[in-house]
Image (cartoon, grey):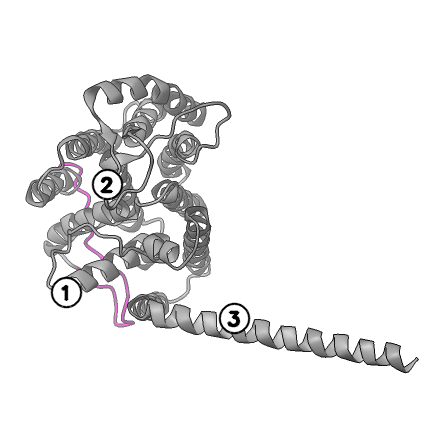
Amino acid sequence: MELFVALLTTLIVIPILKPLAIKAGLVDLPNARKHHEGAVPLIGGIAIFLGTLTAALIAFPNDATIRLFLLSAALIVFLGMLDDKQDLPVRTRIVAQILIGGILVYGAGHYIHNLGNLFYFGDIELGVIGTVFTIVAVIAAINAFNMTDGIDGLAGSLALNSFTAIAVLFYLSGNREQAMLPVIIAFSVVPFLLFNLSLLPGKARKIFMGDAGSMFIGLSVIWMLTLGTQGDNPSFRPVTALWIIAIPLMDMVAIVFRRIKKGQSPFKPDREHLHHIFMRAGMTSKGALAVICSASIFLAAIGIICEYHQVAESVMFFGFLALFAVYNYAILHIWKLLKWIQFCSERKKSSISREIGNKLLKTAACALAR
C-alpha cells in the first residue's frame, strides 16, 4: 500500500508542480556547462520528497525518528530549492547542511561512533568525535550525490541503486521494518526517472532533479547508512557502506583532490566528472549512464555479498582503497589510457582486416587453380 502511495503521489505532483515552477522561475537554463534545450523545471527533488513524505507518514505514523528524518529532509529540500532559484554561496550551503546534520546527531541521537574493525586490530571507536565525523559525512554525502547530477538519469539511477542495496541489507539482517523507508524512497524516484529520461508516451516535458533532489538523496542515504551501521544491533557493518555508495564517493573525492591540486576551490563547478569524461571520450549520455550505473550495481553487489558472507572488514576496506587507487590513477591518466585503448582497438581491427584479406586471397588463388 505505502509503496503504491509513494509511486502515485510522485507521479501526480510532477504535472502539478511543472507550471508552478515555470511561473516561479524555478527552472534550469542552458549555459556554458549545461547543454540541454530550453528552460527545464527543477521539481524532481520536490516531487520525490512529497512522495516519500506521504508514504512514510502512512507507514510510520508514530515513529519519532522517522519524523525527525522527514523534518531534516524538508529543510534540506527547502535549502536546495533556494539554491536552485538563487544559487546560494558555498558558505551558506555548508552552514545550513551542518545545522540540518545536527538534527540527525543531536535531535535523533544517531551518529557514527564505530567504524568497525578496519585494520584487524579491533573496532575503531570514535566516541564524542563521532558527532563531528557524522556531520562531515552528511556534508560529503549531500555533495557527492549533488556532483553526480550532470547527465539525464544519473543521480536518480545511482540513488535507486543505493536505496535498493540498503533495503536488501536491512532485509537480510531481519530488520524488515527499517527496509521499508529506503524502498519507499526508491519507489518515489521511479516516476522522476520516467520524466527525466523522457520514457513516458506523449509530450511529457522533461524535468530535472535540482539541488533539492540531490541534497535530499544524499541526506537520506547517509541517514539510513548511519541507522544501519550503528547502535547495539547494527544491520550491517560500516565498511559495507563504502561499497554501496562507491561511485558517488570516489567521484567526489577524486574531483576534490584534482581541484585542490590545481589550487581551485573544491566546490568550483566544472566538467571534469566521470560522466563528462566518458562523453568527451565519445560516449553518448545514455552510454555513459549505462556504464556508470552498471559499475555502481556491480560494486554494491560486491558489498552485499561480502556482508552476507561476513568477509573480514579489513579485507573489504583495503580492497576498497585499492579500487579507489586504481580509479584515481585511471582518471588522472584517462586520456593516455583512452589513447592506448584506441591504439589497441585499431591494431586489432588492422589485424582482423589482414586476416580477412589473406583468406580472400587464398580463396581466390584456389578458385584460379581449379
Left or right, 112 with reference to 186: left
**Residue 345, disc:** 3
- The residue shown at (43%, 54%) is 283
**Proximity of marks 2 and 3: CB atoms separated by less than 8 Å:** no
- The residue shown at (42%, 32%) is 187
The amino acid type found where label 1 is placed reads Lys
Can you tell which quarter of the image residue 149 is in?
A: top left
Q: Distance between the residues labelled 1 and 2?
A: 24 Å
- Label 3 neighbour load within 10 Å: few <14, some 14-19, many 20+: few
Mark 1 vs mark 2: give the one in front.
2
The answer, for residue 231, to whether it is visible in the render is no
Residue that label 2 marks: 31
Return the x and y of residue 301 as percentages of the image width and height: 45, 55
In this view, the residue farthest toward the front is 368
Question: Helix or strand or loop: what does disc 1 sit on?
Answer: loop
Labels 3 and 1: the sequence-earlier one: 1
Which stretch appears magenta?
Answer: 107-125
Left or right, 343 with reference to 74: right
Q: Distance between the residues labelled 3 and 1?
A: 33 Å
Q: In this view, does 163 lie above or below 116?
A: above
Residue that label 1 marks: 262
Q: Main secondary structure of the magenta part?
A: loop
**Proximity of marks 1 and 2: CB atoms separated by less than 8 Å:** no
The amino acid type found where label 2 is placed reads Asn
Labels 1 and 2: the sequence-earlier one: 2
Return the x and y of residue 91 as percentages of the image width and height: 6, 45
- The residue shown at (44%, 45%) is 168
- The residue shown at (26%, 53%) is 271
Can you tell which quarter of the image residue 72 is in?
A: top left
Question: Helix or strand or loop: what does disc 2 sit on?
Answer: loop
Return the x and y of residue 20 as percentages of the image width and height: 26, 18
Residue 114 falls inside the magenta stretch: yes
